[in-house]
Image (cartoon, rainbow, N blue to C red):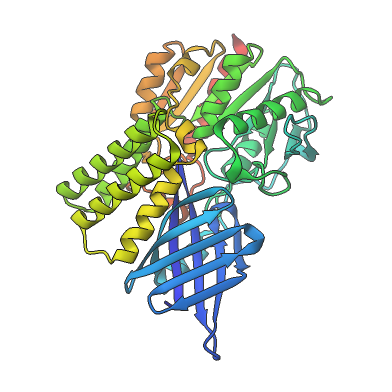
Amino acid sequence: MEGSWNGLLALPVGSLRIVFHLKQLPGGEWDCRLDSPDQGVSDIPVSEVEVQGDSLHIVAKGLALEYRGVLRDRDCIEGSFVQGGFSTRLELNRRDAQEEGKEKADVSHTEVSGDEPYSSQEYFTTDHPQGISLAGTLTIPNTVLKDRPTIILITGSGPQNRDEEILGHKPFAVLADILAHHGYTIFRYDDRGVGKSTGKYYEASVEDLIVDAKSVLNYVRSLDAVNPENVMLLGHSEGAYIAARLAAEDKSVAAVISIGGPTVPFRQCIEEQILASLKLSNRSEEYLEKTQRLNRQIYDWVQNQTISTDSLRIMIKNHVQEYLADVGSFTLEQKSLVAQQLAEESCTPWFREFIRIDPSATWQAVHCPVLGIYGSKDMQVLPNNADRLRELLPQAEVRLFDGLNHLMQPAITGSPAEYGQIRTTISPEVLSWLVDELARLLQK
């Protein structure tokens, strides 16, 4: 098992990369280092690592993280990932030296200019109803224009820092830089449990994240440098839904900017995301159909609130084991491990809440101006979400950019696996369009 192993944590409307570096020491013991490229951290030592035959067990006590896996073949480990109250299946694939070198060559790139006609100051929110403190950066142009609003940036799914750092790219740092150059004051913040923010991300529900964003909105409005009646919200991915929720409830929000924001029911969004990824894997049509059938059945049960958690867990475990027996050659241990983890992650109160969300009514309740930005090669929030936003809000300005992925990068396939290999953080075409549309809004 010695070597580097890549995994992609599947999150609703998003994903999070993780890398384990395994090395056997001269005495026979094992050392493991952990990278989380999407969060900009690397070389984290783990507390325990045990390799017995084809089984792997990793514990990082400081991160409340545990991974158990079984070697399926030389280049693939199937297992389960647990951190805090979050659990999911996690397949690890062996990374070759060429791939590792390429990622290291690409990881340093981001598009923030060196000429900074603005100042930045760190703040910590107060008066959060759950006692959490959220840390963020307020970027203020040196020349403040009275008509320019303050824009709060809200990250997408998964634990993100204030720059929404992903594989060396810092999209929110780029947005803050560009918008501050055009006179906008920007506030971006670390998610709960990330960076300098307190709290535990994986114990948070969607509603908790909405409470976080509302707390930030209230705090930013209290700052001397901010006109409380002129604050816009910019959200990426799930952050766009959160922005829409706040604007639907608070009519004084000046505008909402949605970058790759989901507008179809979240269950549909997850199913489309999974199918898009499966199609790239070159699996047979029969395999795709069986996997879709499995997911549909599980989601039906999860959405049925009359099914108890204990009953749901048993139903899912049995169904997944039948599926695995049908689609491939798995050991009893592998089938049991995968079935157990899928059952656990599907039975959490958070997931049972998330999968029932239909954002349609929320978007229709937004009465402020809305800008929608989407990419034609987005594999996480598919392009049909742009069409749906136009249906829900005919007055919204919606642009589908050709050839861009979920991060608004020029892409080949749109797969998240490409994010770190692309040199551009955000397409200049997107940035130019956003600046022009904001200027147009100010002229109304």
Percent x, y of residue 369: 54, 14
Q: Is residue 233 above or below residue 187?
A: above
**Residue 289 makes an appearance in the image:** yes
Percent x, y of residue 268: 34, 31
Q: Is residue 389 above or below residue 46?
A: above
Percent x, y of residue 277: 31, 47
Residue at image location 47% in from the left, 37% down from the top? 351
Question: Which quadrant of the view contains residue 35?
Answer: bottom right
**Residue 136 makes an appearance in the image:** no
Seen as rendered, the residue at the extreme bottom is: 27
Camera-side residue of 258 and 288 = 288
Camera-side residue of 356 and 313 = 313
Seen as rendered, the residue at the extreme right is: 224
Residue at image location 41% in from the left, 71% down from the top? 98
Residue at image location 75% in from the left, 27% down from the top? 220
Percent x, y of residue 308: 43, 35
Camera-side residue of 436 and 365 = 365
Camera-side residue of 209 and 19 = 209
Q: Quadrant of the C terminus?
A: top right
